[in-house]
Image: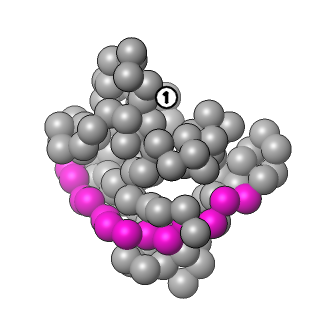
Amino acid sequence: MIHKMNLWNASFNKIKDKTKTIEMRLCDEKRSIIRIGDTIEFTNIKTNEICECVVTNLYKYESFNELYKHHNKISIGYEENEIADPSDMLVYYSAEKIKQYGVLGIEVAVK
């Protein structure tokens, strides 16, 4: 199955460069159907460039706090000199939605 997701420029480039290997999303209806082996077409919202990736693993957690505890900060998109803070995800998702759906770490490899 092919899934389409939009990404901010910085995250898109980190996935394309293979430094960010885990995309973090809510485990909502749209994301809950993703399976290992599926393809994700990431679209850079700034340039409309597309990067095709295969899903290599899925990690389900109750919160971003849990996800952050189990994964290297580089793999989830932070720089070495940055502090990985789960509250950063509140820019994208409300606490209520996180509690409602839980979160999903989608491990990908560029095709």
* Residue 49 visible somewhere in the drawing: yes
Residue at horizontal 27 percent and vertical 38 percent from the top: 72
Q: Position of residue 59 (x, y in %)?
A: 26, 60
Residue 111 left/right relative to 64: right
Residue at horizontal 60 percent and vertical 50 percent from the top: 16
- Identify the amino acid type marked 1: Val
Residue at horizontal 42 percent and vertical 29 percent from the top: 78
Q: Which residues fall within the magenta stretch?
A: 50-63
Viewer-proximal residue, 14 or 60? Answer: 14
Magenta stretch, overall SS: strand
Q: What coloring was used for the rendering?
A: one colour
Residue 3 left/right relative to 105: right
Q: Position of residue 103 (x, y in %)?
A: 32, 52
Badge 1 crowding class, 10 Å Cα cut-off, few under 14, some 14 to 19, many 20 or more, is: few
What residue sits right under mark 1 in the picture? Answer: 91
Residue at horizontal 42 percent and vertical 51 percent from the top: 21
The answer to whether 91 is drawn above or below residue 104 in the figure is above
The answer to whether 61 is drawn above or below residue 63 in the figure is below
Which quadrant holds the C terminus? bottom right
Residue 111 left/right relative to 54: right
